[in-house]
Image (spheres, grey):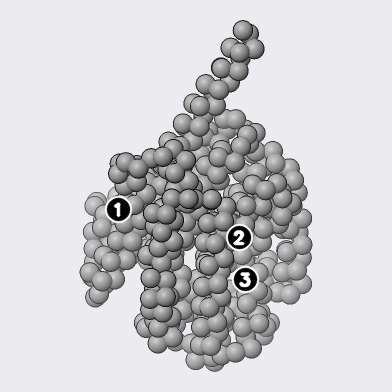
């Protein structure tokens, strides 16, 4: 299965078919712009560099310049060869990430191991990362390494890994905030040191103008809300409300046209998700065991994805650790009922069916009702609810354990 899927994905990238490697070519252009001393976020730079290199279509990069610095070595080859090299790097990174999850899980049930082994190559976000050449697989590996480093009490290393993730894609800063809230000061110290060192390196290699431009021009755009015209692909809470009530995309037909309701509903749902996550991660504030950390870690990652204004399908690769943690829980409790197993399976199906609806069932990109294009959001919410229930169960068990300890001491 792995050979077939990876071979098919490589064919689509090497052919290339339609808009293959569109995001990687954006990274490549930004790396070339830094090499030439041009402003990487300017549309004029993007157009001139892509035309000079013969790149037909590429996304305009809005990430910090750190990623462009990391892929500088690929400028030694042509954009096409670089895209194939990046594909190979992503395959290696995926193998490393999945291997690390298997290594830490100690799963013994052969059926569960086979299901988890097939999951990455049947999961649309993974395939979209290969096809578009995105950086999410690298972020996935860094997040898994962060989790493992902290679980094995290598707190400073966990902090540095989070800092690198933040400088590549800004959203992991919420995980640093999480460790501040949990009073894990070694992780926080490692994060601050990493942010300073990587930031200094970025300033030195990219220039102060490039770095400053991200924080003054691009970051406000990322925080401002959804990207206009992309509602049909946006799976965040703001994106879904826009899709259903006030889309800017011409590909979506809303349920009703009500921009005020879309804006207010998005704000209320976002606030509820944040408040619920904070409350669930606050009992107790101190991390008592690995199970508590696993649950809270996943909740923070998912909540961050939900509340960000721009959430694309490929970013959902970060759900892979969640499925592994669910499998561990099922095996630990000897649960084999279909009711329990059906929930994570339904999540995968909901996420995968979006690409079928959008690409295969709608090849001409005709206007579709908004509710047909929110299945990845529903799959993400389902996993979030699974971990909410799991965390509530842990809190109840913790309180019962505390009461039993008090009763034993009194006795």
Q: In 3D space, how far apart are the residues under numbered discs 1 and 2 (Cα atoms)? A: 34 Å
Reading the image, the residue beneath label 2 is 142
Residue 5 marker: none
> At 64% from the left edge and 39% from the top edge, which residue is drawn?
181
Q: In 3D space, how far apart are the residues under numbered discs 3 and 1 (Cα atoms)? A: 34 Å
**Mark toward the start of the polypeptide (3 vs 1):** 3
Please indicate whether residue 155 sits to the left or right of residue 175 in the image. right
The reply to whether dot 3 and dot 1 touch (C-beta < 8 Å) is no
Reading the image, the residue beneath label 1 is 244
In this view, 150 is above or below 195: above
> At 36% from the left edge and 82% from the top edge, which residue is drawn?
18
> At 28% from the left edge and 66% from the top edge, which residue is drawn?
356
Reading the image, the residue beneath label 3 is 67
Please indicate whether residue 399 sits to the left or right of residue 261 in the image. right
Q: Helix, strand, or loop for circle 2?
A: helix
In this view, 156 is above or below 273: below
- Visible in this render: residue 173? no
Location of residue 375 (image quadrant): bottom left
């Amino acid at each position: 299965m792995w050979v077939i899927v990876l071979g098919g994905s490589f064919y689509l990238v090497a052919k290339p078919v339609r808009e293959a490697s569109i995001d990687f070519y954006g990274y490549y252009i930004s790396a070339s712009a830094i090499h030439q001393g041009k402003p990487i976020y300017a549309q004029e730079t993007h157009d001139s560099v892509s035309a000079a290199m013969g790149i037909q279509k590429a996304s305009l990069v809005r990430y910090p310049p750190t990623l462009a610095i990391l892929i500088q070595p690929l400028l030694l080859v042509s954009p096409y060869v670089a895209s194939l090299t990046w594909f190979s790097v992503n395959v290696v990174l995926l193998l490393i990430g999945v291997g690390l999850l298997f290594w830490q899980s100690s799963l013994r049930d052969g059926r569960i191991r086979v299901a988890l082994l097939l999951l990455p190559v049947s999961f649309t976000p993974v395939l979209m990362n290969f096809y578009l050449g995105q950086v999410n697989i690298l972020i996935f590996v860094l997040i898994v390494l962060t989790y493992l480093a902290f679980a094995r009490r290598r707190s400073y290393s966990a902090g540095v890994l989070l800092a690198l993730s933040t400088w590549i894609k800004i959203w992991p800063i919420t995980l640093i905030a999480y460790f501040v809230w949990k009073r894990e000061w070694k992780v926080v110290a490692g994060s601050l040191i990493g942010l300073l060192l990587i930031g200094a390196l970025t300033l030195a290699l990219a220039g102060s103008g490039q770095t400053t431009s991200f924080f003054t021009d691009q970051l406000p755009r990322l925080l401002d809300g959804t990207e206009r015209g992309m509602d049909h692909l946006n799976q965040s809470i703001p994106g879904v409300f826009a899709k259903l009530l006030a889309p800017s995309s011409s590909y979506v037909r809303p349920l009703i046209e009500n921009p005020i309701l879309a804006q207010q509903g998005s704000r209320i749902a976002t606030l509820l998700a944040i408040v619920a996550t904070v409350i669930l991660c606050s009992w107790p504030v101190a991390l008592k065991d690995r199970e508590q950390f696993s649950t809270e870690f996943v909740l923070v990652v998912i909540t961050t994805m939900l509340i960000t204004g721009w959430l694309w399908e490929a970013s959902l690769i970060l759900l892979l650790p969640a499925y592994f943690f669910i499998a561990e829980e099922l095996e630990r409790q000897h649960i084999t009922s279909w009711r329990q197993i059906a929930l994570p399976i339904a999540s995968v199906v909901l996420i995968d069916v979006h690409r079928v609806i959008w690409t295969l069932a709608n090849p001409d990109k005709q206007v579709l009702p908004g509710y047909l294009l929110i299945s990845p959001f529903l799959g993400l919410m389902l996993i979030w609810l699974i971990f909410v229930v799991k965390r509530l169960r842990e809190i109840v068990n913790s309180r019962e354990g505390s009461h039993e300890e008090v009763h034993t001491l009194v006795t």
